[in-house]
Image: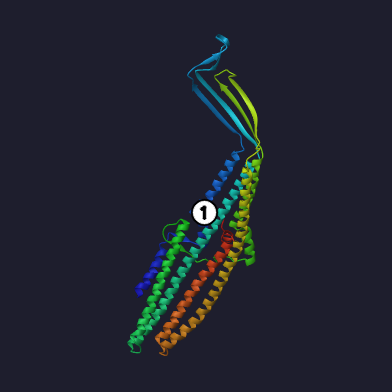
Amino acid sequence: MKRLTAALWIALCAVTASAQTTLTFDAALQRALEVNNTIERSQQDIAFAQSNKDYLLSAVMPKITLTGDLTRNSIEQSFGGDGEDSVTILPRNDWAYRVTLSQPIYAGRRELRAYSQAKIGIENAREGVRATEDNILLRVASSYLAVVNAERRVELEQRNIALAEKRLVQAQAFFEAGEVTKVDVFRAETAKKAAQRMAATALQQREHAVAQLRSDLDLDGPVAVSTPDQALPVLPAEEALIARATSSRPDIDIAENNVRVAQLEVQKQRGYWLPTVTFDGGYIQQKTPFPADKYSYGAFRFNVPLFQAGEVHARIAGAKSREKQAELDLETAKLEAREDVRRAFADLRSAETGLQLAQEQVVFAQAEYDQAFDLYSAQEATSLDLSVSETSLADANRAVAEEILNRDLAKLRVLYAAGAMKEALNNGVKNP
């Protein structure tokens, strides 16, 4: 019996003693922001959006090209007689090259609207990174607190094992004295095995939480954590967090940006009704002297749409529909953000109530157990009475540990619902 209890402690101590990485709560959050693959992947969206903006900017910049050709014709043709008056208009071996410049001047401001949309795309990519960071911080903080809770549960089960051993010693003594039957000894053994099983389950839960931490923090090997003095900050008032959520949560900002993109799209489609103007210039040199062997040119070219069979009207109608959808998405996002905060606060209030009741339950369960053990020692209560009080105390202590975790997780979900994870959890941590 003692060997199994010791084995559980050895397993836990081995994890801590041989740990390659020791984490504090703040250090875990900081590392998540620095090395998490999901965050790094989302940051590439910013670079992609920046590249798209640069690409659209290039559409309004001048383009210079060099083209040339070498030609072998089947015949050679000249006119003007023989000698110096002869002009070759079709040489057998011909060559030419030209340098051209093309500069868009006006296209209904379509390129400007597309460029503005691309800049909003960069803002959306940044908001996407912020949303990803909040997700990862929530997951890392939850995993960290789960590890702390699992270690707390292991310690609790060790106390429950100690209580069962205490009863087992007493029951064995009574049995040897002929005061009780073997049933009392069996009950004590059963209680001890149940506590050992719960300790093993707590160790399993710890390893699952550590595995998630290793994945999110790009670690390998055992991980040891320290219990934070105050892991989570004091929460602002519910209405303040609702106001924050509906004004600055990443998905709200993205929805607002999408409305702006849709408005620009309507304006861009209207630009197809307007003329386009470009300037072209070039320099040409060729073997053929007709009409000249080298010359340059410049030209303004315009295109005026006169009749497009309803194409532009259909495009505008479609863009307006997308604009309306974007506005409805924004309204829905604000409604969901508000209710997310309210639901999170309801869960937090429930968890705090549950914790308070569990703590009060421990007080009464401890008093019940102390009295029951005294009565059992005095042979004034049965082993069944003591077993019931012992189980009640163990369950109450487990409930406290569980409700502490539920309260902390509920706080995290409140911060997440308000879009305040990074600010609240990293007040003293610099952004990477």
Q: What residue is drawn where x is 63% and y is 55%? A: 327
Q: Amino acid at mark 1?
A: Ile
Camera-nearest residue between 42 and 280: 280
Q: Give percent across and percent down for residue 297.
A: 63, 25
Q: Nearer the viewer, residue 253 or 185?
A: 253
Q: Position of residue 241 (x, y in %)?
A: 62, 64
Q: Residues within 10 Å of mark 1 (few under 14, many from 20)?
A: many
Circle 1 residue = 39
- Coordinates of residue 301 in the picture (x, y in percent): 64, 32
Taking the image as shown, residue 274 lies to the left or right of residue 353, namely right
Whole-percent x and y of residue 200?
Answer: 40, 70
Q: Is residue 222 above or below residue 65?
A: below
Quadrant of the image containing the N terminus: bottom left
The residue under the point 41% across, 71% down is: 199
Residue 415, by quadrant, is bottom right
Q: In this rendering, is residue 74 above or below 413?
A: above
Residue ranking furthest to the top: 83
Left or right? Give the position of 114 relative to 6. right
Q: Is residue 3 left or right of residue 218?
A: left
Q: Is residue 109 visible?
A: no
In what element is the residue under mark 1? helix
- The correct choice, above or below, for 165 with respect to 266 in the image is below
Residue drawn at point x = 50 percent, y = 54 percent: 38
The image shows a total of numbered marks equal to 1
Residue 42 visible? The answer is yes
Q: Residue at x 42, y 64 (%)?
A: 207
Q: Residue furthest front?
A: 309
